[in-house]
Amino acid sequence: MIEDDEDPSDEYIKAYNEGYQMARHEPELLDEVLKSQDSQYIRTMSLGKEQFEHEKLMTEMKSIRDKQKMNIKRKPKF
């Protein structure tokens, strides 16, 4: 894990980005990779996966809120 006051190494950035991109495009393959090995590189890939999943959830929640707002605006007032 990287400390707050440290700049991430090139290898850390690479592993994080690979985890993020694999979660986006090949999530099943990433899950197999994460299960099959244990190293700092793999743990960092897992952090990239978590970030992707967090962003995906936030996007889905925003979409639901936007739809709810549209439904509220469309309801006629009596």
Image: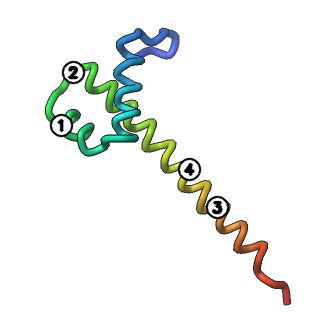
The Cα atoms of the two marked residues, 1 and 2, are separated by 11 Å
Image coordinates for residue 5, horizontal then vertical, percent: 52, 11
Is disc 4 placed on a helix, strand or loop?
Answer: helix
**Amino acid type shown at disc 2:** Ser
Rendered-image quadrant of the N terminus: top left
Q: Secondary structure at mark 2?
A: loop
- Residue furthest bottom in the image: 78
Q: Amino acid at mark 4?
A: Thr
CB of mark 4 within 8 Å of CB of mark 1? Answer: no
Indicate which disc, 1 or 3, sits on the residue closer to the N terminus: 1
Q: Callout 3 environment at 10 Å: few (<14), some (14 to 19), or many (20+)? A: few
In the orientation shown, which residue stands out farthest toward the right? 78
* 71 lies above or below 63: below
User: Mark 2 or mark 4, which is nearer to you?
Assistant: 4
Give the residue at mark 2.
Answer: 39
Report the residue at 14% width, 33% height from top. Answer: 36
Dividing the picture into quadrants, the one containing residue 52 is: top left
Callout 2–callout 3 Cβ contact below 8 Å:
no
Is 57 left, or right, of 11 in this rendering?
Answer: right
Residue extending farthest to the front is 25
Give the residue pinned by disc 1: 35
Q: Pointer 4: what residue?
A: 59
